[in-house]
Image: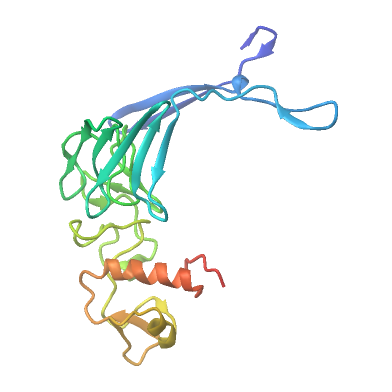
Amino acid sequence: MLGSGYLHLIICYHLSRAAGLLDHYKYNLNLRPQLSVGDLGELYYDSKESIDNVTTWIYEEGLFTPIGKIIEDKYYSIVSDYLRTPKQVYDIEGNLIWRRELDVYGNPVIGENDFIPFLYQGQYVDIKTGDAYNRFRYYSPETGLYLSQDALGIVGGLNLYSYVFDTNSQFDLFGWYSDLLDTGVGHHLFPRSVAKKLGISELMNKNSISWYPNKGKGTANLHKLLHRNLIDEGVPFHGSKFKG
């Protein structure tokens, strides 16, 4: 509509499921800073974005483990368990202000996800839907399964939606790690010399150029180790961003 001498551009977003509307919000494009050119040809914005209600997360270096949260002038420390899952939050005076316990699927049995929306490593909870963003896929704590299929197909396991074998000892950082097959049909192709250099000794080869484990059950962490080491080593393989 027209008003105040310019066109109002309002964008409306609606998030819904079969059960009904989950959330909606509006965004005024006219309030977005505009890029302008100065008298000397310099570029500048005619206004600044609002920085109200900004939340800053602090992570442990090189990891996805949140260790701190800053909301304007308030500082909080995050304590995680042995799987790097957030458990408690303390303010600068040492007061416990948040606590959460999860069941084996990631559902809160004590506390809520609102103040710290991180579940298992690599997962960020959408408070409105309850599902967790897991990089390459979305995870449902309600079912303990992914909402989309494994991009590797049955190579990643017969259950295309399964999470890790044991949530008490494993996690899936990117939504693509699963137990490896012990059938001789692996999807990791790299030389024995590279495996030896990386210190990977739990794999064997049965007259094939594909590496696979002696026992497939419970090897999701080994699967993760393979991907991480191959990327760091600069060895190209399907789906990797190698440095070579």
Residue 157 can be seen in this image: no
Measured along the vertical axis of the image, is residue 144 above or below residue 205? above
Residue 24 in the image: state x and y as whole percent: 41, 24
Measured along the vertical axis of the image, is residue 153 above or below residue 88? below
Residue placed at 47% from the left, 69% from the top? 232
Number of numbered discs visible in the structure rendering: 0
Residue 173 can be seen in this image: yes
Residue 58 in the image: state x and y as whole percent: 40, 42
Extreme residue in the top direction: 4
Measured along the vertical axis of the image, is residue 99 above or below residue 188? above
Residue placed at 38% from the left, 54% from the top? 63
Residue placed at 48% from the left, 21% from the top? 26
Q: Quadrant of residue 70?
A: top left
Residue 195 in the image: state x and y as whole percent: 39, 82
Residue nearest the viewer, comparing 99 with 2: 99
Residue nearest the viewer, comparing 178 with 151: 178
State how the image is colored. rainbow
Extreme residue in the front direction: 93
Q: Is residue 34 left or right of residue 26?
A: right
Residue 49 in the image: state x and y as whole percent: 57, 25
Residue placed at 37% from the left, 26% from the top? 23
For the N terminus, the image quarter is top right
For the C terminus, the image quarter is bottom right
Measured along the vertical axis of the image, is residue 139 above or below residue 7? below
Extreme residue in the bottom direction: 207
